[in-house]
């Protein structure tokens, strides 16, 4: 299991090099020797054959895949321990009054990329489940033959898991040891590397997949052509990552204004502060992109359902801007008028979105598919054929749709660990949503293909009848 040596025959190239003498006596050939010498060689050969001595094995040691995997896991945990130890020691070097600000600043730069890394890991799991369930996801998303497999996606996620925390550890270490300029360069270099990697024009680092992602993002921003399943699927994922984009905006703003590794940036009313008007604008953009897609679909199909879907995304707009308005109005005005309006908008948006998930995106109308599986899909036979799975996703999706209520607590609202946890839970909710959304699309494709085959089969039967009638006439 852990690898080892394997026996080679006596004539193997491992035992005999070109131009060298044989490792054993070539018995049966005199080679021009004297009769006595030939007799001695034959006697020695008989002795070797009688002893059955094992052959000398010089095969190079090749470790087994299991051994390599275990070695990588050990190195990964060792790396994680070193990062945690260095980060903890670096934080403890700071004074108590500046420690929270220091952690919040470091967390702001790196938590968006950590959430993106989590999304990549979860998407790899999605692909793996689709593959195990024999769901042709490449056909659903219109992917070419060079699309990434789940192993390649996990490989990318592994490198992201290593690079992002390593950069964060270097930032904490350098800043706590007085190397402020070097510390400030760490997130800047990381963001530049990620941006360059996405637009790198050479055929390395999965060029076709990177450009497929960029083309899809471009179609989402400018929906000037027919909307495909991949377009609105990715746009829905972007709505769950709106907090990631707002943190990216704040991070890039500080990098541009050279506020990295400076505690003074924490002022809420500064150019890149938490009360900036740019934050709600960035938060609402994914919802507006999805709304415009729905309007474009209505223009192409004249389906009124797309207008109801557009209305769903429009309900997120007042929630976002009313939440931001809290920092720009007097407290009595907020408590008297705007806060109840914000609560009402949040409840409407959560319930409307939940209803749409269940009845439209997942096609669980009236929950009948929870208790009846008369026509299970290939995906249902693997995972979704269990009633508890549907009960779990219905209950957890409703709870996670209402996680915005943490903002009712002033303590939780300004706790960056709580905000990070809520953003991670929303990404997990979208990960669950993807399973059932793709299952529904796969069922629709199968039903359409069966409907298209029916006229063909009936036509074949008519041809057979006509041919039989012609034979009878003859």
Image (spheres, rainbow, N blue to C red):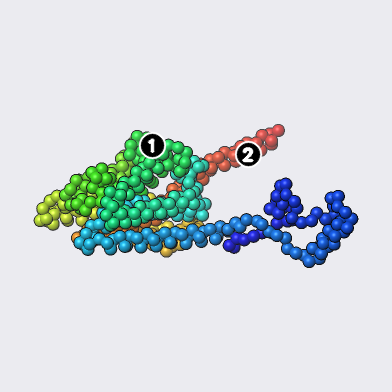
Q: Nearer the viewer, residue 374 or 275?
A: 275
Q: Is residue 420 visible?
A: yes
Q: Earlier in the sequence, mark 1 or mark 2?
A: 1
Q: Position of residue 208 (x, y in %)?
A: 46, 40
Q: Residue furthest bottom?
A: 51
- Image location (x, y in percent) of residue 201: 42, 37
**182 horizontally vs 48: left or right:** left
**Pointer 2 local density, CA inside 10 Å: few below 14, some 14–19, many at least 20:** few
Q: Residue at x 44, y 50 (%)?
A: 156
**Residue 23 located left or right of residue 34:** left
Residue 406 in view, yes or no: no
Residue 183 x, y percent position in the rendering: 30, 51
Q: Is residue 350 left or right of residue 394?
A: left
Q: Residue at x 75, y 53 (%)?
A: 22
**In front: label 1 or label 2:** 1
Mark 1 Cα within 10 Å, few/some/many (few <14, many 20+)?
A: some
Looking at the image, which residue sits at the far right?
35
Q: Secondary structure at mark 1?
A: loop
Circle on res. 464: 2
Screen quadrant of the C terminus: top right
- Residue 395, disc: none
Label 1 sits on residue: 226
Residue drawn at (82%, 62%) of the image: 44
Describe residue 449's horizontal placement relative to residue 115 as left or right: right
Dot 2 falls on a residue whose secondary structure is helix
Mark 1 → mark 2, Cα distance in angstroms: 41 Å
The answer to the question of whether label 1 and label 2 lie on touching residues, with beta carbons closer than 8 A, is no
Residue 292, percent across and down?
Answer: 31, 40
Q: Quadrant of the N terminus?
A: bottom right
Badge count: 2
Residue 225 lies, with reference to residue 134, above or below; the image says above
């Amino acid at each position: 299991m852990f690898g080892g040596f394997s026996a080679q025959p006596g004539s193997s190239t491992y035992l005999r090099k070109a131009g060298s003498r044989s490792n054993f006596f070539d018995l049966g050939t005199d080679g021009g020797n004297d009769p006595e010498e030939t007799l001695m060689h034959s006697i020695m050969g008989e002795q070797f054959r009688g002893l059955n001595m094992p052959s000398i094995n010089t095969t190079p040691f090749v470790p087994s895949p299991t051994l390599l995997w275990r070695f990588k896991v050990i190195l990964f945990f060792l790396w994680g321990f070193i990062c945690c130890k260095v980060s903890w020691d670096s934080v403890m070097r700071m004074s108590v009054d500046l420690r929270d600000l220091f952690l919040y600043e470091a967390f702001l730069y790196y938590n968006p990329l950590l959430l993106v890394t989590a999304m990549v890991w979860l998407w790899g799991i999605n692909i793996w489940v689709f593959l195990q369930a024999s769901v042709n996801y490449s056909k659903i998303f219109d992917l070419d033959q060079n699309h990434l497999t789940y192993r390649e996606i996990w490989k990318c996620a592994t490198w992201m898991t290593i690079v992002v925390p390593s950069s964060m550890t270097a930032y904490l270490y350098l800043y706590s040891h007085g190397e402020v300029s070097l510390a400030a360069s760490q997130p800047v270099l990381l963001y530049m590397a990620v941006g360059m990697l996405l637009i790198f024009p050479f055929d390395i680092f999965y060029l076709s997949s990177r450009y497929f992602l960029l083309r899809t993002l471009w179609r989402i921003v400018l929906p000037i052509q027919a909307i495909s399943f991949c377009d609105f699927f990715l746009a829905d994922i972007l709505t769950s990552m709106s907090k990631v984009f707002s943190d990216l905006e704040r991070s890039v703003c500080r990098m541009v204004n050279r506020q990295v590794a400076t505690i003074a940036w924490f002022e809420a009313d500064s150019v890149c502060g938490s009360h900036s008007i740019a934050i709600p604008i960035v938060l609402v953009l994914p919802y507006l992109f999805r709304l415009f897609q729905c309007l474009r679909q209505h223009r192409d199909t004249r389906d009124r359902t797309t207008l109801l879907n557009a209305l769903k995304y429009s309900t997120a707009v007042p929630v976002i801007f009313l939440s931001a308005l809290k920092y720009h109005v007097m407290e009595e005005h907020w408590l008297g008028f705007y806060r109840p309006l914000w609560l009402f908008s949040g409840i409407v948006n959560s319930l409307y979105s939940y209803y749409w998930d269940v009845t439209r995106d997942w096609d669980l109308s009236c929950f009948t598919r929870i208790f009846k599986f008369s026509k299970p899909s290939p995906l249902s036979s693997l995972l979704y054929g269990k009633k508890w799975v549907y009960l779990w996703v219905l209950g957890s999706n409703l709870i996670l749709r209402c996680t915005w209520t943490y903002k009712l607590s002033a303590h939780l609202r300004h706790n960056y660990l709580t905000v990070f946890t809520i953003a991670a839970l929303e990404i997990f909710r979208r990960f669950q949503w993807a399973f059932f959304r793709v299952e529904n699309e796969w069922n629709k494709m199968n039903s359409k293909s069966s409907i298209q085959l029916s006229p063909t089969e009936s036509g074949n039967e008519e041809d057979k009848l006509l041919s039989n009638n012609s034979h009878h006439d003859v």
